[in-house]
């Protein structure tokens, strides 16, 4: 019997990979991805001449890629993403004439892209991202007319311009060239790519404006041009891009030279009702924000900060829910929390004139006023009756139901007695936390949940009670234990084990941060990763945290890390306290970029957020607000400082730490960069994160 397929992926295997595989000469499919295979991958793989599919991604293979590719005539898919291969890109890969999918991303290849790569006419997927490649991008890649996905960004150092020949890639769906050193203007020929849905040219040195030919990109849903040197107007043809969901133009030199009837931000921009992520911060835009922006109900993320806007923020709609940070840096703009609009003398005069013009009509409304007064009296009477009835039911309404998840020596009365202002030890988006000491001496933390309509006894429970019971069954060394759930018709209380040293965020960014030595930080990283790994891989069904952040990693008396508040975010409602993002996706500075255009969270969203926590541990900085380069978050700041080179981690290390083993810091930094990869499919799993962090110790 001949064997045609070998699939041992995702089995957590840690070993070298035997060359005996070549004895299975009839193999067509080899899938060993997402394990921990290490060492050199057997170059004898070329003996499997029937092979069509080879996926060895997300392992720890290393060495040069000196395979005899010319013998793999049938190979259609070759994926070696996220390993440790190095040296130059192999040229003989072009001799695999049937190759359709080639992923060399996430390795350590250096040098230039061979011009012969433009000869692989069957390719529909090519990724060379996340390496150390340099030189100009060869124009010959424009000959890959079957190409649908092209990834050349991150860690690479390509210079020169974007080849005009890319305008011939008519089937292209995704073009990502971000985080290189590209110069020049955007080729207008890119406007020929009518099937393009995602274009990312961010973090380069590109100049000029947005080509008018981009009006042809009717399928475009993502356009990232941030951190370049673009200038000129934001073109009004943006309104002709009906599928645009994400528009990031921040930190450029766009100005308000747009015709005044459109406004410096075109009114058409507000007519893209599908738009949910808009960032035009750190430009030179002026005049007022179009009132039409207020009707974009799908807008979950917006940033207008650090421009020259004036006037007031449009009332109503989503804009009123964003934090002040989304509007600050516009000295003439008012109407947000930290800069409310004031009534000027001109406003007062206009108001007086309007009042004067109405004096002649006041008599006509006296009768209406009297009727309104009578109606109000009736309303108050009805309200008093309803209030009286409610008060008669209050004793029943306030009866507490206690669900215990372990043996307890106290009850709901003792738990509820903790809810007083003097016991508050923390406040956050999920609720207020109180410390309590029970009669038997047990110390507990009681979280009073906010943003959930009524208590769990309500008929509008929406699965909350069932979810809490699921969370209550979880027991893991590095997860905060949910002891009990206490509720009535108005309030939900969660009872947890008390963590003596508070949250990682409080310690790291407070006065005690200097005492959090490197070995403790690395230990915390590993422990928190293990807690998240348990939620993702050992719970059935898996549990997505949804709000991973340093404030949700708690420390006990021994500074042992415990993951907290897992699974609660999806029940939080928007109380008007959202920052520049929707509250159900996480906390500002930790939210994975794909949420802006998918509105979905999964385990890879948690991985991104955990990567931000790792960067906090390395740098000692908060996710936002701690950087001289205004408008940057910790991920973008780190990328700019290190150029995605782990050897440059010394530039970002927390200055409060006296001595750090550089090898350990480099490894943690490497893991962090993988976690915060902009594309979720490229991020490791939490199981892989645990394994990679363990290598740093």
Image (cartoon, grey):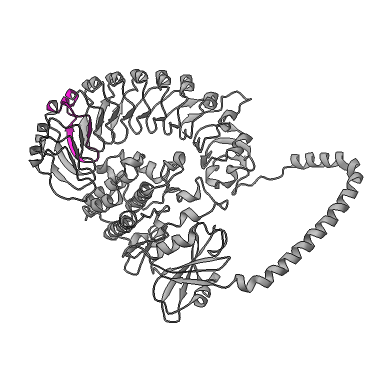
Q: Please state which of residues 362 and 67 is positioned toward the viewer in this rendering.
A: 67
Along the horizontal axis of the image, is 278 left or right of 167? right
Residue at figure coordinates x 30%, y 51% from the top left: 686
- Is 619 left, or right, of 28 in this rendering? right
Q: Nearer the viewer, residue 521 or 243?
A: 243
Which range of residues does the magenta coloring cover?
A: 71-95
Vertical placement of 145 versus 425: above or below?
A: above
Q: Position of residue 143 (x, y in %)?
A: 29, 18
Q: Is residue 509 visible?
A: no
**Disc count in the image?**
0
Q: Report which quarter residue 227 is drawn in.
A: top left
Magenta residue check for 91: yes
> Horizontal placement of 559 versus 322: left or right?
left
Q: Is 150 one of the magenta-colored residues?
A: no
Front position in the image: 492 or 24: 24
In the rendering, at what x and y percent does residue 203 appear? 38, 33
- Considering every residue shown, the one lying at the far bottom of the view is 440
- Above or below, 255 against 628 in this view is above
Q: Position of residue 652 (x, y in %)?
A: 32, 47
**Residue 180 to residue 624: above or below:** above
Residue positioned most to the front? 1
Is residue 689 visible in the rendered structure shown here? Answer: yes
What residue sits 79% from the left and 40% below the top? 349
Res. 386 image quadrant: bottom right
Q: Residue 267, image x and y in percent? A: 60, 29
Q: Nearer the viewer, residue 155 or 472?
A: 472
Q: Quadrant of the N terminus?
A: top left
Quadrant containing the C terminus is bottom left
């Amino acid at each position: 019997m001949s064997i045609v397929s070998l699939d041992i992926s995702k089995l957590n295997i840690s070993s070298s990979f035997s060359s005996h595989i070549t004895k299975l000469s009839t193999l067509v499919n080899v899938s060993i991805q997402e394990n921990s295979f290490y060492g050199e991958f057997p170059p004898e793989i070329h003996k499997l001449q029937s092979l069509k599919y080879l996926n060895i991604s997300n392992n720890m293979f290393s060495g040069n890629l000196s395979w005899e590719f010319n013998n793999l005539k049938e190979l259609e898919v070759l994926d070696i993403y996220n390993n440790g291969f190095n040296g130059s890109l192999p040229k003989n890969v072009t001799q695999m004439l049937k190759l359709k999918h080639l992923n060399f991303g996430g390795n350590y290849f250096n040098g230039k892209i061979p011009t012969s790569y433009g000869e692989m006419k069957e390719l529909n997927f090519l990724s060379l991202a996340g390496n150390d490649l340099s030189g100009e991008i060869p124009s010959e890649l424009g000959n890959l007319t079957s190409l649908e996905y092209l990834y050349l960004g991150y860690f690479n150092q390509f210079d020169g311009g974007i080849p005009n020949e890319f305008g011939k890639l008519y089937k292209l769906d995704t073009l990502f060239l971000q985080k290189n050193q590209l110069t020049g203007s955007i080729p207008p020929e890119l406007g020929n790519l009518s099937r393009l849905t995602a274009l990312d040219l961010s973090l380069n040195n590109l100049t000029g404006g947005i080509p008018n030919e981009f009006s042809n990109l009717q399928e475009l849903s993502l356009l990232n041009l941030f951190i370049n040197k673009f200038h000129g107007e934001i073109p009004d043809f943006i309104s002709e891009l009906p599928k645009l969901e994400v528009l990031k133009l921040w930190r450029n030199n766009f100005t308000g030279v747009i015709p005044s009837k459109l406004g410096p931000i075109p009114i058409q921009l507000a007519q893209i009702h599908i738009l949910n992520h808009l960032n035009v911060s750190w430009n030179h835009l002026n005049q007022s924000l179009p009132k039409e922006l207020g009707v974009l109900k799908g807008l979950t993320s917006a940033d207008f900060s650090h421009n020259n806007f004036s006037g007031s923020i449009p009332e109503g709609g989503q804009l009123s829910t964003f934090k002040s940070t989304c509007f600050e840096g516009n000295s003439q703009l008012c109407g947000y929390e930290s800069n409310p609009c004031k009534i000027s003398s001109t406003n007062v005069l206009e108001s007086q004139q309007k009042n004067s013009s109405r004096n002649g009509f006041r008599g006509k409304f006296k009768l209406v006023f009297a009727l309104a007064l009578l109606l109000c009296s009736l309303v108050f009477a009805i309200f008093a009756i309803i209030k009286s009835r409610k008060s008669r039911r209050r004793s029943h309404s306030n009866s507490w139901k206690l669900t215990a998840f372990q043996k307890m020596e106290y009850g709901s009365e003792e738990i509820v007695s903790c809810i007083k202002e003097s016991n508050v030890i923390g406040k956050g988006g999920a609720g207020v936390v109180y410390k309590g000491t029970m009669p038997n001496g047990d110390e507990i933390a009681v979280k009073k949940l906010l943003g959930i309509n009524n208590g769990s006894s309500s008929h509008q429970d929406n699965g909350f009670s069932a979810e809490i019971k699921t969370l209550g069954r979880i027991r893991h060394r590095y997860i905060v234990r949910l002891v009990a759930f206490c509720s009535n018709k108005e309030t939900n209380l969660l009872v947890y084990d008390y963590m003596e040293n508070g949250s990682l965020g409080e310690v790291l960014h407070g006065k005690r941060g200097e005492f959090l030595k490197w070995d403790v930080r690395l230990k915390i990283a590993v422990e928190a990763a293990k807690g998240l790994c348990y939620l993702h891989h050992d719970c059935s069904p898996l549990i997505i945290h949804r709000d991973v952040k340093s404030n949700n990693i708690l420390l006990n008396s021994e500074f042992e890390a415990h993951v907290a508040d897992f699974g609660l975010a999806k029940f939080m409602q928007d109380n008007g306290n959202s920052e520049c993002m929707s509250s159900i996706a996480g906390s500002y500075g930790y939210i994975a970029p794909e949420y802006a255009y998918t509105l979905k969270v999964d385990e890879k969203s948690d991985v991104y957020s955990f990567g931000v926590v790792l960067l906090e541990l390395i740098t000692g900085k908060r996710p936002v607000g701690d950087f001289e380069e205004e408008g940057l978050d910790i991920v973008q700041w780190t990328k700019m400082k290190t150029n995605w080179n782990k050897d440059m981690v010394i530039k970002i290390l927390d200055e409060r730490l006296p001595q750090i083993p550089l090898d350990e810091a480099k490894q943690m930094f490497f893991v962090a960069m993988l976690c915060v990869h902009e594309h979720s499919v490229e991020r490791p799993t939490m199981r892989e994160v645990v394994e990679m962090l363990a290598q740093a110790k």
